Image (cartoon, helix red, strand yellow):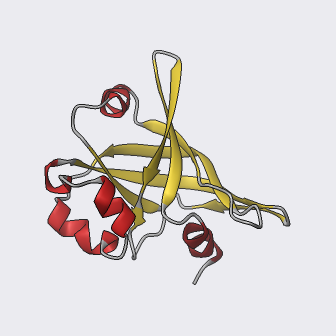
Amino acid sequence: MTLFEEYIQASRGLAFVATSKQNQPSVRIMGFAPDPDQPNIWYFNSKPNTEKMIDLAANENVSIITPLNQNGARIESNHATMRRSDKKWADIKDLFANNKPYLHAHPDVENEVILVLEIHSARLASYAGTEIVNFD
């Protein structure tokens, strides 16, 4: 397991996602599942008619930070993009199979939009230090 994957595990599948539309920032906490073959690709779901969907349609550039664990471990990135995915729920549902709270929060998940986050570079930060990871 890579250090980046260890930090993903420390996040407990949660990320704060910041968007901006017309210079107005907005942040929300969202649950995600990483792609097992590309850990810098994360999948999310959203109801189709939400403010975040409007924000993302206007600007796919996002910033993210995962919650800190007891060691301060977190993933930070202001070099990421989020957009609608071509995938269907059936394509990614196994990634969320063990996340009962996520599934409980998305009772109509089959009718939601699948979003894909691509992290181009990230800062892995903790109380012990930092490391930069580039994926491009």
Does residue 94 sit above or below 60 in this rendering?
below
What residue is at 17 percent from the left and 52 percent from the top? Answer: 108
Left or right: 98 as drawn, with respect to 79: left
Left or right: 131 as drawn, with respect to 61: right
What residue is at 42 percent from the left and 55 percent from the top? Answer: 31
Q: Nearer the viewer, residue 131 or 47?
A: 47
The quarter of the picture where residue 44 lies is bottom left
Residue 66 percent across, percent down from the top left: 59, 54
What residue is at 30 percent from the left and 74 percent from the top? Answer: 97
Left or right: 22 as drawn, with respect to 133: left
Residue 59 percent across, percent down from the top left: 40, 29
Q: Nearer the viewer, residue 50 or 91?
A: 50
Q: Farthest residue in the right direction?
A: 128
The quarter of the picture where residue 74 lies is bottom right
Residue 106 percent across, percent down from the top left: 27, 54
Left or right: 8 as drawn, with respect to 86: right
Does residue 78 sit above or below 50 in this rendering?
below
